[in-house]
Image (cartoon, grey):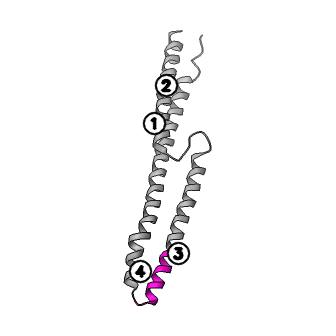
């Protein structure tokens, strides 16, 4: 009987700690929403958006470079591309990489929680 009480208490403490960790991760993950849809699907959507944020500035960069090259100053086109458009692409990929890394850390912590919960909630040994 004592083992069941301590297991129940440990399970309740685990649940309380996980609830606090989930609120931490909700803040930390930002745009990723927990419990709404799988995180992998959300990351795939953000990856597609990141590719779009790469393609559009890249097309604009080629247009600016071509325009300035026509007038004999490709150096100004490259400088404009490097100052205005390249940071957009870099920030988009940096943001995606940070979001993916945080999501991976959350999934690892959630898996640890589920393993621990399963261990604590496992069936007690049979009474002879």
For numbered disc 2, what is the local secondary structure?
A: helix
Foreground disc of the pair 4, 3 = 4
Residue placed most toward the observer, 38 or 115: 38
- Mark-to-mark CA distance, 4 and 1: 45 Å
In the image, what residue occupies the spot 54% across and 9% down? 1
Give percent across and percent down for residue 110.
Answer: 51, 37
Label 2, residues with CA under 10 Å away: few <14, some 14-19, many ≥20:
few
Query: Of residues 3 and 101, which is closer to you in this image?
Result: 101
Sequence-first disc among 4 and 2: 2
* 85 is higher (above) or lower (below) than 11: below
Residue at image position (46%, 33%) is 21
Q: CA distance from mark 4 to mark 2?
A: 57 Å
The label shown at residue 24 is 1
Tag 1 secondary structure: helix
Q: CA distance from mark 4 to mark 3?
A: 13 Å
Circle 4 residue = 77
Q: Nearer the viewer, mark 4 or mark 1?
A: 4
Provide the residue designation for mark 3. 59
Q: Which residue is mark 2?
A: 16
Front tag of 4 and 2: 4
């Amino acid at each position: 009987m004592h083992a069941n009480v301590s297991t129940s208490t440990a399970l309740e403490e685990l649940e309380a700690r996980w609830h606090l960790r989930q609120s931490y991760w909700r803040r930390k993950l930002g745009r990723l929403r927990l419990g709404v849809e799988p995180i992998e699907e959300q990351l795939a959507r953000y990856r597609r958006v990141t590719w779009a944020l790469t393609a559009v500035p890249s097309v604009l960069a080629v247009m600016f470079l071509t325009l300035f090259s026509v007038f004999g100053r490709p150096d100004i086109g490259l400088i404009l591309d490097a100052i205005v458009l390249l940071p957009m692409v870099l920030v988009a990929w940096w943001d995606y990489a940070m979001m993916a890394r945080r999501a991976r850390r959350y999934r690892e912590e959630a898996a640890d929680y589920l393993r621990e919960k399963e261990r604590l909630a496992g069936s007690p040994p049979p009474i002879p």
